[in-house]
Image (cartoon, helix red, strand yellow):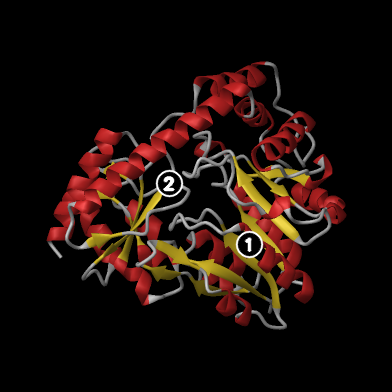
């Protein structure tokens, strides 16, 4: 008898973790490998959580999240994207990754498949395997002439069959910064309605965009309350709260009771006092911080673009949202090995493109960096990366 399921036994650490294991915590390494800014969570958020802790907010609470926070999340969606979402459709199970797993658990059974637009954060296809589903990746295509990533809708739909239970789309995307158009979203929603396929929409970077809009196009603005659309969101990125592990799930109204039961089973809800920090993040002070972070990321994107302009072997599709550069390096064929050497020899941490797919060789020519950093440190890290590339 096997002690655990074979699919679990076969799971391996992601390519990102294989790189960070060589230098995480080393002060000599300049890290661009994780999806986070170098800013500490703002004081007003930390003080709110600290005050909640001092006030004794240490007990069990509603596993779906405290009501004031769920109401504030409803208002956040309304003012940023115009989505009208009932409080009953919002569950705060813990981290956004737990929201992803909850959505997958709701729609997938062993033997099903989930079609995923890639390149994609590796936790997504790993999570699909954990729930017993087969991840099917449909890769974005490079449109170098237009300078943007492109989704072939026919290929996306052709990847679906009778066992497909969900489409997973991250927009803006990690690692590419690609963004779905409103027309593409409507087309996808119509297809999924006709086929009885759920949509799991990762909108964590929805407000981290650079075209002046308040929010990227959102499935939540066009879906009916009982459409099989699951929206994933998080406090981690826009408010520099990666270590807090507070995210939320917007789900169909019809599964409210199931969502409550699953929140109880999976995590018994998000940490009580941390939710008060999240509540402060949605205050006007938090709105100002979020806007300032977008400008910090925009400046970082400009730093990377100027650096690329001086390179002979590096190019990118300028990201429309999120805070990553997915850099194509001519001649790079082993991105994991390159990143591991760069940590040890050049003291710079970047993520291998190989990590963001299921063995697609095209992604092995890419590196991912996070540019939500102090401009001077970012320039220094890019100089080190340039030295590593010269050794290829």
Pointer 2 local density, CA inside 10 Å: few below 14, some 14–19, many at least 20: many
* Vertical comparison of 284 with 352: above or below: above
- On the image, numbered disc 1 is attached to which residue? 183
Residue 347: x and y in percent read 21, 47
Q: Can I make out residue 95 in this image?
A: no
Would you place residue 351 above or below residue 306 in this image?
A: below
> Quadrant where the C terminus lies?
bottom left
Crowdedness near tag 1: few (<14), some (14–19) or many (≥20) residues, C-alpha within 10 Å: few
Taking 319 as reference, is 243 left or right? right
Residue 50: percent from the left, percent from the top? 59, 20
| Secondary element type, mark 1 | helix
Q: Residue at x 62, y 39 (%)?
A: 246
Residues 158 and 128: in front is: 158
Write down the quadrant of residue 180 in the picture: bottom right
Task: Name the residue carrying label 2.
Answer: 323
The disc placed on residue 329 is none
Q: Kindly report the distance in space between the C-alpha atoms of the residues bearing marks 1 and 2.
A: 24 Å
Residue 263 sits above or below residue 87 on the image: below
Tell whether 362 sits left or right of 117: left
- In the displayed structure, 278 sits above or below 362; it is above
Which residue appears at 78% of the width and 44% of the height?
85
Numbered circles on residues, count: 2
What residue is shown at x 66% (from left), y 20% (from top)? 52
Q: Earlier in the sequence, mark 1 or mark 2?
A: 1
């Amino acid at each position: 008898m096997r002690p655990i399921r074979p699919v679990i036994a076969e799971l391996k650490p992601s390519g990102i973790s294989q790189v960070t294991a060589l230098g995480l915590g080393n002060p000599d390494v300049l890290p661009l490998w994780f999806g986070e800014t170098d800013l500490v969570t703002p004081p007003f958020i930390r003080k709110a959580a600290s005050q909640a802790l001092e006030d004794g907010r240490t007990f069990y609470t509603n596993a779906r999240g405290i009501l004031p926070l769920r109401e504030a999340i409803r208002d956040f969606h309304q003012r940023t994207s115009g989505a009208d979402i009932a409080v009953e459709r919002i569950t705060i199970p813990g981290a956004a990754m737990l929201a992803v797993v909850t959505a997958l658990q709701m729609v997938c059974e062993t033997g099903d498949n989930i079609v995923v637009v890639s390149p994609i954060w590796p936790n997504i296809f790993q999570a699909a395997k954990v729930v017993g589903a087969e991840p099917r990746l449909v890769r974005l295509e490079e449109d170098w002439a237009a300078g943007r990533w492109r989704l072939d809708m026919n290929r996306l739909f052709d990847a679906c069959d009778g066992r497909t239970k969900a489409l997973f789309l991250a927009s803006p995307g990690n690692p590419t910064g690609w963004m779905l158009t409103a027309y593409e979203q409507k087309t996808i929603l119509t297809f999924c309605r006709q086929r009885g396929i759920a949509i799991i929409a990762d909108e964590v970077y929805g407000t981290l965009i650079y075209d002046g809009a308040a929010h990227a196009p959102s499935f939540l603005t066009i879906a009916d309350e009982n459409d099989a659309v699951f929206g994933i969101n998080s406090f981690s990125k826009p408010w520099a709260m990666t270590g807090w592990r507070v995210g939320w799930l917007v789900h169909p109204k019809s599964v409210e009771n199931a969502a409550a039961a699953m929140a109880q089973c999976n995590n018994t809800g998000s940490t009580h006092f941390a939710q008060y920090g999240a509540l402060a993040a949605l205050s006007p002070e938090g709105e100002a911080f979020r806007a300032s972070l977008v400008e910090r990321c925009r400046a970082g994107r400009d730093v990377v673009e100027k650096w690329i302009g001086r390179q002979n072997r590096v190019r990118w599709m300028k990201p429309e949202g999120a805070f990553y550069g997915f850099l194509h390096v001519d001649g790079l064929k082993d991105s994991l090995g390159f990143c591991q050497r760069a940590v040890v020899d050049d003291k710079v941490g970047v993520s291998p493109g190989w990590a963001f797919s299921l063995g697609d060789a095209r992604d092995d020519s890419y590196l991912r960096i996070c540019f939500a950093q102090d401009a001077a440190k970012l320039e220094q890290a890019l100089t080190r990366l340039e030295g590593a590339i010269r050794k290829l």
